[in-house]
Image: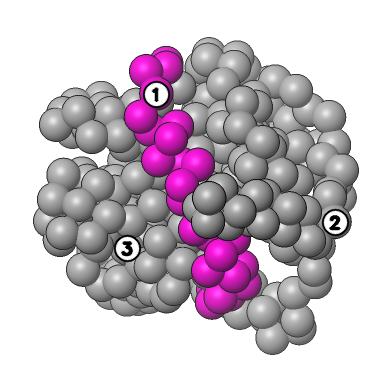
Amino acid sequence: MKLSDADLARFDEEGFVFLPGLFSRDEAQMLMEEAQAIYAQDREEVWRESSGAARTAFAAHTYSEPFRRIGRHPRLVEPVEQLLGEQLYMHQFKINAKAAFDGEVWQWHQDYGTWARDDGMPEPRAMNIALFLEDVTPANGPLLFIPRSHREGVFEAGHDLETTSYPLWTLDRETVASLAREGGVEAPVGPAGSVVMFHGNLVHASPANISPFSRTIVYLSLCAVSNHITKFTRKEWIAHRDFTPIEVLADDCLDELVAQRRAAAAE
Ligand SMILES: O=C(O)CCC(=O)C(=O)O
């Protein structure tokens, strides 16, 4: 799948592109059921909020067939290849839950700030492409982006090990306020199956979810192969060390799994 010239121009200008309804509801539902089964497992790759609700599941593309296919899906991999102009490897893969009532914040940060500091990634030639597995609304903890904040490089950040169970290099309030005075804050919201891709330096966050509706998003952090990480401080299943270029599957690679789920539900 290729991005249009308008998408490319918007990405360059704003630092993100939102593609509503890129996957069908059936595809998103099949993946959502798989995500719930993973969150129910007791495994080290599943991190939890202080309430015990799942916060994120790392590396599901290595132990789940539906997510293995998502990690090689042309609708997710090809747009990033187009933007970065070379083949990609999977730097990180996570399925972020924002549990109804209990989903906690993600503080203001830049992903490349973490990839550079923790993983020694040479350049911001990596980015997230995110697929909504449930409807994302203004109420259930949407991603918040500061448009155009990707243009100013990496900001000073402090390592926050306390606010949530997830250590993060976070920006101070003055920096966020000054960037938001220029760019505002936008929250891409839309139905399950929508996709958003954003620059590694785009400043973003998400609020707590006090609504009764959960919000689940799967993130592929894709990195240009020539830009692979050089420091191995985090677990292999958080920051991958397999730099093999991703070979994409066929566009209909999820159909068989959707049909299997449908047949199982009809029994
Ligand atoms: O899923 C979210 O709400 C935010 C995730 C995020 O910011 C990240 O993974 O860098």
Q: Is residue 166 left or right of residue 104?
A: right
Look at the picture and state if 49 lies above or below 141.
above
Residue type for callout 1 = Gln
Q: How crowded is mark 1: few (under 14 residues within 10 Å), some or many (20 or more)?
A: few
Which residue appears at 70% of the width and 20% of the height? 241
Q: What residue type is labelled 3?
A: Pro
User: Mark 3 CB in 8 Å range of ligand 1?
Assistant: yes
The disc, 3 or 2, on the residue closer to the chain's N-terminal end is 3
Q: Which mark is residue 142?
A: 3
> For the residue with label 1, is its CB less than 8 Å from the closest atom of ligand 1?
no
What residue is shown with label 2?
Answer: 250
Residue topped by disc 1: 41
Residue 267 appears in the rendering: yes
Residue drawn at x 23%, y 34% is 53
Magenta stretch? 17-44
Mark pair 3, 1: CA separation: 25 Å
Left or right position of 39 against 253: left
> Can you tell which quarter of the image residue 199 is in?
bottom right
Q: How many labels does the image show?
A: 3
Q: Is mark 1 on a helix, strand or loop?
A: loop
Q: Is residue 222 visible from the viewing direction of this image? A: no
The answer to whether the residues at label 3 and label 1 have Cβ atoms under 8 Å apart is no
Res 161 → quadrant:
top left
Q: Nearer the viewer, residue 50 or 254?
A: 254
* Residue at image location 45% in from the left, 32% down from the top: 38
Residue 42, image x and y in percent?
Answer: 37, 18
